[in-house]
Amino acid sequence: MTGVLLTVVCYTISSLGDKYISSRLKCSPAEFAFIVSFATMVWIGITFPITGWGFPFNMRNGLILLFLAVWKVMEFYTSALLLKTVSAYELKAWLGINIVCSYHFNVMQGVYRADVWVALCSVILLMGIVMIMKGRDESRRTEEGSFGKLCLLFLLFILSKFLYGLMLGQMTQGCRTTSVLFIVMLVTALLQLPRIQVRELMGRKGMGGAALTRLPNAAGLILEAMIAMENIFLYAMIQPIQLALLFVASIGKREPMGRMKLAGSLLCILSVCAITVLIYI
């Protein structure tokens, strides 16, 4: 659980950086994916003298790497589009659905037993997410486009996160997490080159600060990958737990929050905490 908490701290910092890159720097999805993947790759590469390299290449690992790159690109593109109009806090609220999917996956795998109280908390979690969405003011909904399109982007983002964690757990023994992450980020960055102007992007004001936000992200990715290889449920818990921290941050920044959104936020936080306690009991 210590690893989960450390990962949460790292990702909370990097989540605010994601919002900065997408919204403040006005990056396209391809530019966002390139900045995040390339900078993260560099920071991970610096750790190799300590962590070493370990990646036994075979057909199985190669195919898994391909899928990991696909899910990572989907994650970057959907988050880039969403963060142009929603806060990092709202994005993490939706990721609460990931914990529900991961729990039931573990039930099917025989890792956990089905529990009616966990199922009830899952329903409450979904209710909280619906309330957060309804609590958004109409002017912001209009700017974001159709409500259905926004929900579709959220669901694709959740799917990419779940499948990424699931595929990481399928890597064969002998694969070092840093090596796997380095290759995934390298492939992701290379895939963006035909869609961006590297010189113009690197010369954009504020790019140095954006690159620095990838340092805690790199640390979080390493910790997250280690957790995913151990337990898919704990992996899913990382993102929702950030919700509590980002919720406090949003209040500190005096982000507009009506009664409906506030109530939905509290339901999400309490249900995630309740599911955690029930699982460990």
Image: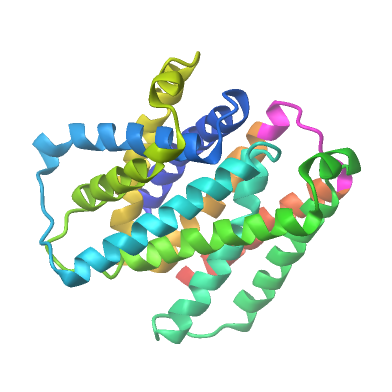
- Along the horizontal axis of the image, is 151 left or right of 73? right
Q: Position of residue 89 (x, y in %)?
A: 64, 42
**What segment is highlighted magenta in the picture?**
250-259
Image point (45%, 40%), residue name: 33
| Dominant secondary structure of the residues highlighted in magenta in the image | loop
Where's the N terminus, which quadrant? bottom left
Q: Position of residue 221 (x, y in %)?
A: 35, 46
Image point (14%, 67%), residue name: 173
Image point (28%, 43%), residue name: 186
Total count of labels: 0
Asked whether 153 or 178 is in front, the reply is 153
The reply to whether residue 35 is in sight is yes
Most distant residue in the front direction? 194
Q: Is 278 placed above or below 258 here?
A: below
Q: Position of residue 126 (x, y in %)?
A: 71, 66
Image point (38%, 37%), residue name: 193
Dividing the picture into quarters, in which one does residue 196 lie?
top left
Q: Position of residue 118 (x, y in %)?
A: 60, 75
Q: Is 214 placed above or below 54 here?
A: above
The reply to whether residue 228 is in sight is no
Q: Is 164 placed above or below 202 here?
A: below
> Magenta includes 252?
yes
Check the image and tell me how it is coloured: rainbow
- Along the horizontal axis of the image, is 140 left or right of 109? right
> Magenta includes 41?
no
